[in-house]
Structures are given as C-alpha cells and as structure tokens.
Amino acid sequence: MGAPDTGDTAWMLASAALVLLMTPGLAFFYGGMVRAKGVLNMLMMSISSMGVVTVLWALYGYSMAFGNDKFNFVGDPTQYWGLKGIIGGNAAAAVVADPSAGVEAADAVTIPLAGTIPMSVFVAFQLMFAIITVALISGAVADRLKFSGWLLFSGLWVTVVYFPVAHWVFAFDGFTGETGGWIANKLAAVDFAGGTAVHINAGTAGLVLAIILGKRKGWPGSPMRPHNLPFVMLGAGLLWFGWYGFNAGSAVGSGGLAGATFVTTTVATAAAMLAWLLTEKIRDGHATSLGAASGIVAGLVAITPSCSSVNVVGALVIGVVAGVLCALAVGLKFKLGFDDSLDVVGVHLVGGLAGTLLVGLVAAPETGAGVAGLFYGGGFDQLWRQAVGAGAVLLYSAIGTAIVAYIVKFTVGLRLDEEEERNGIDEAEHAETAYELA
C-alpha cells in the first residue's frame, strides 16, 4: 500500500496499451499470410482472445498468476477473485488542518502497489501478455479449426497452462507483496519479458495442437501462398512498435533499465531481419518481404527473454543467431510432416529457445540483470538455469495442451469437415468473406 510514482505509472499505462496493440498487429501479420478465404477467421482468432482472456483474467487469472504461491505451482486463485481489493481510488497525501483557510485535516490515502505503480496498472499490463500468448497459437492451426473449438480451447488453455506458467516466470517474491513462482525465485532463470512463458509456451502449444488437429487438405502439395503481403508487413511493423511496451515495459518503471531494453530490442530485431534476408538470398536466390517480416518477429522473440541481460554486442549476436536459425527452422515442418500453417514453431518456439539459452552464453554482468554468461566468465551456472526453465515450460505446455485439445475434440469438436474446409473457413464459420469481388 502506498502512493505510486506518477512517471512510472504513466509509462506503464502506455506500455500496456502498446502490448494490447500487438494483438491486432499479430492479426494482420497472420491474416496476410493465409489464403483470401481464411483471412477473417485468422483475424477473429486473435481478436476473440482479447475477449476470452480478459474476462478470465479479471475473474481468477491474475490471482492464479500473482496470488500467493500454492504448492510451488500456482497462485491462490481466490486471493484476488474478481480483482477484489485492487480497484480503488487515487492515492493522496495527508492534509494538515488550516482553520484560517477553511482546510480540514485528512489522513493519507494509499492504494495497493506493485513496485512503484498501482496494482491495477500492473493487472492491465500483465493481461496483455496473456492475450497475445493465446493469440500466437492460432497461427499454427489456420484454415481448419472450428471457431467454437478455438474459443473453448482458448479459455481452457489459458487457465490450465498460461496462468500457472506466468506464475512461475513473472511472479517475483515481494513485488506485489506475495510469494512468487519457482522459476523466477528459486531457479533464478532470466526471462525478462516472456521467452519461456509467452514464446516457448505458445510455440509448443501450436506444435501439439497442429499435430492433434491434422494437416490442411492438400498440404503440402497444393500452393497455399500468402494472399496479402502488405498486411503481413503492416502486422510486423505494429508488432515491432508494440514490442517496446512488451520489453521496455517489463522494467515496470521509466528508468535506465527501460532505456537499455529499448536499445537492445531494437538492435537485435534489426540484426535478425538482415540475417534472415541473407539466409534467404544464399538459399533461394531472393530476399523476400515475407522474409523481412518474419525476421523482424524472430528477432523480437529471441531478445524478449534476454533484453535486460545483454549489451549491444550480445543483442547483435542474439539477433543474427535467431535470424539464421528461424529462417532454417521454418522448413522443418516439411521434413517432419507437421502442418504448422504460419510457422509458429519455427519462429516462436525456436526463437524463444534460442533467446532463452543464449542468456547463459552472452549475458553481461554490467547489465540490469547482473548475471554473467559463459563468455563473460560466469561458467555454466546461468546456462543450466536457462535450460531447466525452458525445458520445464516446454514439457508442461506440451502435456497441458494435449489434455486441453482432446477435451475440446471430444466435446464441441476441433476440426471443420472436409467440404467446409474446401469452401473456406470464413464462409463456413462466419458467413462472411473478406473481399466482395462480384
């Protein structure tokens, strides 16, 4: 309880809005990558996550993520049920009585704080992370997942998988006055803005859901090219813009740490885009706009866990490694036979793993995180912590996603029938088309 810092509060309100903008940005990024007969459904899967996740977060999600730790697994879901005790008035200093001016004495008014900001602002900021994590999964299952199945999956998955993992990774002891999660506090793995909780988590979920759902009709033989590359570029630009709220906002304040993460985020993203384009040029003979957009996202993903722990040289290394690795990884689906429609696995799972593990190599002790990686004399201590954190989230996400997917499959159903899929998911599920060409 106390009075918030107004500068930090202003920055965090702006950051929350920036992170929310990432979800419509993702909708355009994904929407442009599918065929014209599936773009509305792709947009709807992202936008609907804003509705489903927000309601559950307000009821019990925040409490599960940031309530007092229970069993080293999850926060107390009843502690902040319905955000009780969090929504209140403004803080105010005590007033000294001055009878000559007609001023009566008043006690100081304090409100619940998370660090130096109102807890209500922290609630809003973390909500946006939950929303986009769910939306990310949709890219793996484009064109074939029933919308009713997606809505049920979203609600169950965010409850069973995301809320507990967010507790492990983001709930630091004492920050909101509670006992936090094991990855943040006991393992002490560095994940500044969600390489594990967001990207490894969503990438693994996308892989498992795509395998259970099955391949699109005609894949991989039939061409399924992006129908609107300007949409993809627009989405990538909005994601890059919003990501400053994602990474620099995770400083939960407007000081030097936010500035440092802003710079490392920019450097790594630029390097990853160039590395992806170079990889394309060498491999295919062409540097494409889709490659540029994908490289931007790969760099953003990889620097997310590490932006507070690397210097500019480390950010360049992470960007280059992510750009090359992810450009090569998107082809794995053809070799291994899983239909990850929009490369969620190749970009988010591989990029998230790369960024998380590279902390153990290139973390610099002079940075905000204050840890030293292998190349800075820290030995393997941080590397094993990063590997355990990443592996635990991957394994839990895989098991949890499979359970949720089968529940949905045997209740409302997962997959469109063959004729609906052939005619297009927009017509079948929404009775609309994106483009009236008659």
Image (cartoon, rainbow, N blue to C red):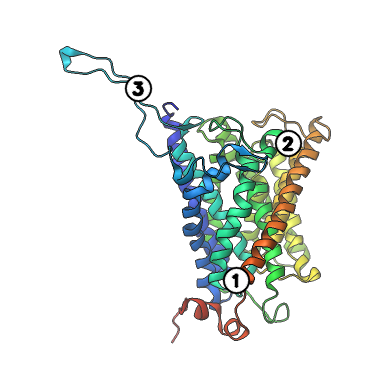
Residue sitting at the far right: 379
The residues tagged by marks 3 and 2 sit, at their Cα atoms, a distance apart of 39 Å
- Along the polypeptide, which appears first: circle 3 or circle 1? 3
**Is residue 60 toward the left or the right of residue 334 in the image?**
left
Label 1 is placed on what type of residue?
Thr
Looking at the image, tell me whether mark 3 or mark 2 is earlier in sequence order.
3
- Amino acid under disc 3: Ala
| Residue that carries the numbered disc 1 in the rendered image | 411
Q: Residue at x 58, y 59 (%)?
A: 156
Q: Which mark is residue 93?
A: none
User: x and y percent of residue 238 in the render?
Assistant: 52, 55
Tell which of 149 and 75 is nearer to you.
75
Residue 83 placement (x, y as % from top left): 45, 43
Between the C-alphas of marks 3 and 1, the distance is 54 Å
* Label 3 Cα neighbours within 10 Å, binned few <14 / some 14-19 / many ≥20: few
- CA gap, disc 2 to disc 1? 38 Å
What residue sits 58% from the left and 36% below the top? 68
* Quadrant (top left, top right, bottom left, bottom right) of the N terminus: top left
Secondary structure category for the residue under label 3: loop
Residue 301 in view of the camera: yes
Residue drawn 64% across the image and 31% down it: 368
Three-letter code, disc 2: Leu
Q: Secondary structure at mark 2?
A: helix
Residue pointed to by mark 2: 187
Local crowd size for mark 2, using a 10 Å CA cut-off: few (<14), some (14–19), many (≥20):
some
Which element type, helix, strand or loop, lies under badge 1?
loop
| Residue occupying image coordinates x 50% and y 53% | 56
